[in-house]
Image: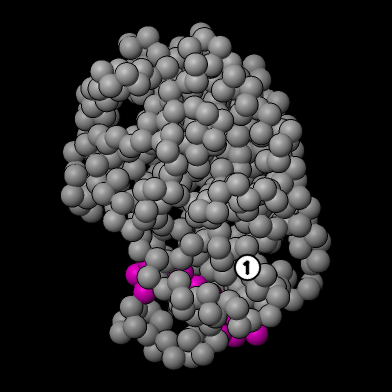
Amino acid sequence: MYPHFLLVTFPAQGHINPALEFAKRLARLGSRVTFVTSTFAYRQMTKFNREAGAGSNISFATYSDGYDDGRPESVPPRLYMEEIRRHSSIALPEIIGSCADEGRRVTFVVYSLLLPWIASVARELDLPSALLWIQPAALLAIYYHYFNEDFGDNFEKVLEGRSGSVELPGLPRLAKSDLPSHLITTKFALSAFKEHLRELGDEASPRVLINSFDALEPEALDALKGFTETITVGPLVPRRYLTEINDNENDTTPGFDLFENSSREKYVKFLNSNAKHSVVYISFGSTSVLPNTQVEEIVNGLLNSPFTFMWVLREYNNSDGPFAEKLEELEKRGVLVPWCSQMEVLSHPSIGCFLTHCGWNSMAESLSCGVPVVAFPQWADQPTNAKLAEDVWGIGVRMRPNAEGVVEAEEVGKCLKMVMGGENEGMVKSAMRWKEAVRAAASSGGSSDVSLKRFVEKIRGVC
């Protein structure tokens, strides 16, 4: 009997896509998956995408997060987290009961980041569970050590400026600027991470499925062995970009977009018209919004450089914005679009580097495509990801802000030249080596392939 996984995800683009890719991999191994997210997120998913691409072994269910028409900007994150906890805790048992009534008994629960209470719901229903960690293992190690009494003082010294860096098992030395923002400014999520660790500690056999692979983070994974079983299943990007096997012609997208990709014809034509490794791709993800002063500096840095670019600006508008006066000049040098299929772009031969906010999905996609990065981290896990990219994996350079926290145009141009201008061929070679390592991990018999199959077989054995 194959397992039936209930996979519950936080309703944000950066959470849904890796979770859906994980669902596809479970389904490909014969498992049945019920994919659960918020009502509003699911409406957006089906508005811009074809549900059929998810696969016949995957069905969908929804829970209310209290804002079925979308969360108003006036609702603070802390209140939203309270609402999603309250509503989902009621909805999940009902969904599980409905599955049983339909002859599809749930045998295992997987829940993604920021939903720690789902573990308690599963225990109350006598169901085993695992956390799907959609960040690198290094971040889990950081939070584990932060809440561990043996390292708490070391963190405080760095955060208070009494020490320049903190040294943790399995990780490089981390300065304050390398730590996740949830330890410094955006603390609304810190309680969720603490609860995640507490829930794992309450499990008889804690399991964490990690969106990474063994060769990328061997030391960080090793440092977690005494705390939890770690199962590397990444990178969770469309399989067709990871192997030579083309067993699903439709499996070329990351799953679902919460934003409309209305400019595909425009940017594909642009990319096809440019030479190999000649285009700078720029995107800062689905949540980051840069202040106008920073956008102006990036505009000036691009225009003062010799490089062609493709820039994703979700708030892009032809009539206003900080770049309005230079819009004509920008469009002569590159292309601006409100959204795109990022894996399609990164895998295009014309892309030479990725100017990125360093969200983990973007980093995983960049590693998978062998594209070096210019790192511009904003918040959450991004500063740590940038540190790893520059100093551990050797695939890019990090832009440094001035005293006011703004990266100036000169710095933008300098960093682009370092990656695109041939001043550091080592980054390009490292990026290509990691692309091959990704393919090795994802291929049949590779580390991520084997660990996922073992996990499913283990769950199957107790169904």
Left or right: 48, with 90 as reference point: right
- Image coordinates of residue 291 in percent, x first then y, are 39, 67
Residue in front for this viewpoint, 346 or 199: 346
Q: Residue at x 31, y 82 (%)?
A: 320
- Image coordinates of residue 41 in percent, x first then y, are 30, 46
Residue in front for this viewpoint, 219 or 439: 439
Q: Name the residue under label 1.
A: 348
- Image coordinates of residue 284 in percent, x first then y, are 48, 61
Residue 87 magenta-highlighted: no
To which quarter of the image does residue 421 belong? bottom right
Residue 330 vs 65, above or below: the answer is below
- Image coordinates of residue 399 in percent, x first then y, are 61, 64
Q: Which residue is drawn at 76% across and 57% down?
A: 432
Residue in front for this viewpoint, 137 or 63: 63
To which quarter of the image does residue 232 belong? top right
Residue 312 magenta-highlighted: yes
Magenta residues (range): 302-316
